Amino acid sequence: MKRFIKKSLTVLLAVIMLSGTFTCLAADYEKQYEDYGSYVLLGDSVASGWSDVEYRETRFVRVEGSYGAYVADDLGVEYHPMACIGFRTVEMRYIFEDDFEGDRFLFYSIDHEEMEWRIPEIRKAVSEAGLITLNVGGNDWGSYLGWHVFEEMDKFHDKNEEFMQKAEEYLMNAGTDENTIESLIDLADLCGALPDIIKVLPSALKTGLENYMINWNYMIEDIYALNPDVTLLVIGMFDNMVRDQETAEENEAALLKLSVGQMIVDYANKPMIEGAEKYGYTFVDTTGTVCEENHPSPEGHRYIADKILDALPDASFPYTDVAKDADEYKTIEYMYQNGIMQGISDTEFGLDMPLTKGQLADAIYAVCGAEDVVDTSDPDKEASFLETVISAFKMVVNSGATFRQYVKAIVLTINLISAKGILDLNSTLTRAEAAVLLKGFLDII
């Protein structure tokens, strides 16, 4: 028993120290992308490239420094920017459906006549696209919810005329402001309309949220009806209180303060994430996007573009037994790109085949960037594995990993040992399970 505990602690310490080296991998690898031919950008002001600090026209035009322009240039495709400030799921449904009427705030940010002649152009671009990114929902959750409150308050219009006038003016300029409800409550308090807004708030919010959930599914089905084979990426919403990359990555105290906003965003992203499984599109998590105010900064746009490019499959990925929609695809693609795990042949990864402890040792050494791998021809695979992790421990003992990384690595390592029993001579891991577990350590930093 003591021998087992001693070995367990050795492995635990080794993997803890390994966490400090996981980011230094295959820097010279260049991902290859499919030839999508035509890329269509759909969405609201975030997608269009709107700036909070410098005015620029962004409706249906290419905006330099926007994530859409970055993606188009990096892929070398024909670019069709079809995003517009103020767009919601309501506008998207109206564009794609002949019999959908929309609501009283339809196309509030653009002339209706202009939209009528643009609609055929948008439908044609979508039907011919090889790649589409969709970024919409911020207005549904911001001013859209406020508009439902405004509509419910109309029944009290006569005695709250001042509030109704100021509220409509505010909502027309609120954009993606997630504090719309709070602002309307403050305005109602100033105008003496607080008792009435409290009465209508529950039903207004319920209506707004239900409409968003319903519209989302219709909108996705509309896109696939026009183009069943398109590669569709849905860009998630993000907490717009992140002001710099240091805050996004390192300042835990600041992130704690932002947790409430992130909780709201997570809920707003829920139908997007659920739809990815239902419809087969790819959800792109943009948590940590740096913003000017309500919209991404130049740094934020580059960040979103990189997230999109990372989410696209690697055209050079050789393993035909790993489907692109498989849960393990992105993990195994990462292992391939970074030289951590290789397949059982040039075209097969061997998802369900067992992995020996010697092969796991090879993978750990690959993560560490070691030049000489411990000899895994030794029949005593447990010894080879332990030799490997002990050597890895020595290599990275001065790696500079943070305490936060150590704590996360401890938790992950305990889960690994308890769930998979990697020190048990009779235990086995499939190659897919090993890839997922190794990627878990990579994700902690």
Image (spheres, helix red, strand yellow):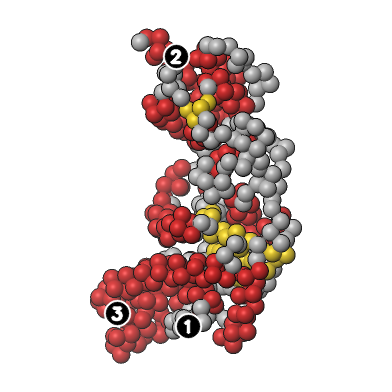
Residue 263 lies, with reference to residue 2, above or below; the image says: below
Residue 223 lies, with reference to residue 290, above or below; the image says: below
Q: Secondary structure at mark 1?
A: loop
Residue 227 lies, with reference to residue 114, above or below; the image says: above
Name which residue lies at 32% across and 70% down: 206
Earlier-in-chain disc, 3 versus 1? 1
Q: Amino acid at mark 1?
A: Asp
Q: Which of the 4 image quadrants contains residue 193? A: bottom left
Q: Which mark is residue 7?
A: 2
Q: Disc 3 designates what residue?
A: 193
The image shows residue 321 at horizontal and vertical percentages of: 58, 41
Q: Secondary structure at mark 3?
A: loop
Q: Are marks 3 and 1 in contact (CB under 8 Å)?
A: no
- The mark lying in front, picked from 3 and 2, is 2
Name which residue lies at 54% across and 66% down: 224
Q: Disc 1 designates what residue?
A: 99
Earlier-in-chain disc, 1 versus 2? 2
* Whole-number angstrom distance, CA of label 3 to CA of label 1: 37 Å
